Amino acid sequence: MKFDGTVSLGNALSIATVIVGLSIGYAKLQAQQEDSHRRISVIEAAANAREGRIRAAEIALAGQSSDLRNIQNGIDDIKKSLTQLTNGRSDR
C-alpha cells in the first residue's frame, strides 16, 4: 500500500460539500432552536395567564361557597322559626 499526499479536485469538492452541508445543517438547527424558544415563551405566558384566571375563579368559588353557607343557615333559621310558630299555635 502506497500513500499519495496529493489532493485532487474531487477531494476538495468532497471536503467543500461536507463543510457546506454542515454549515446549512447548523443554521437550520439554530433556526429551529430559536423557534422552539419563542414557542416556549408563548406557552409559558399563556400558562401564567391561565394560572391567574384559575386563582380568580378559585377566589370567586370560595366566596360563593361562603354565601351558600350563609343562605343555608338563613333557611335553617326560617325553618326553626316556622316550626316554633306552628308548635305555638297548635298548643292553643
Image: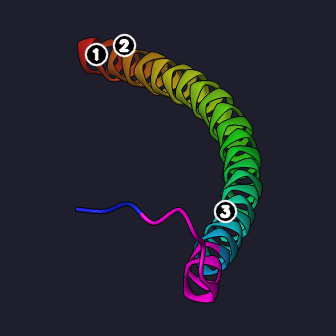
Instruction: Please report the bounds of the magenta region as a residue range.
Output: 4-15
Q: Position of residue 56 (x, y in %)?
A: 72, 35
Relative depth, front residue between 24 and 52: 24
Q: Mark 3: which amino acid?
A: Tyr
* Horizontal side, residue 91 vs residue 61: left or right: left
Residue found 76% across the figure and 57% down from its top: 34
Whichever of callouts 3 and 2 sits on the residue coming sooner in the sequence is: 3
Under circle 2, the secondary element is: helix
Q: Are marks 1 and 2 in contact (CB under 8 Å)?
A: yes
Task: In this rendered view, identify the residue nearer to me: 6 or 49.
Answer: 6
What is the residue that sits farthest to the front in this orientation?
Answer: 2
> Eyeballing the image, is 75 above or below 36?
above
Q: Which secondary structure, mark 3?
A: helix
Residue in the picture at 49% in, 21% down: 69
Question: Marks 3 and 2, Cα distance to the nearest angstrom?
Answer: 86 Å
> Who comes first in sequence, dot 1 or dot 3?
3
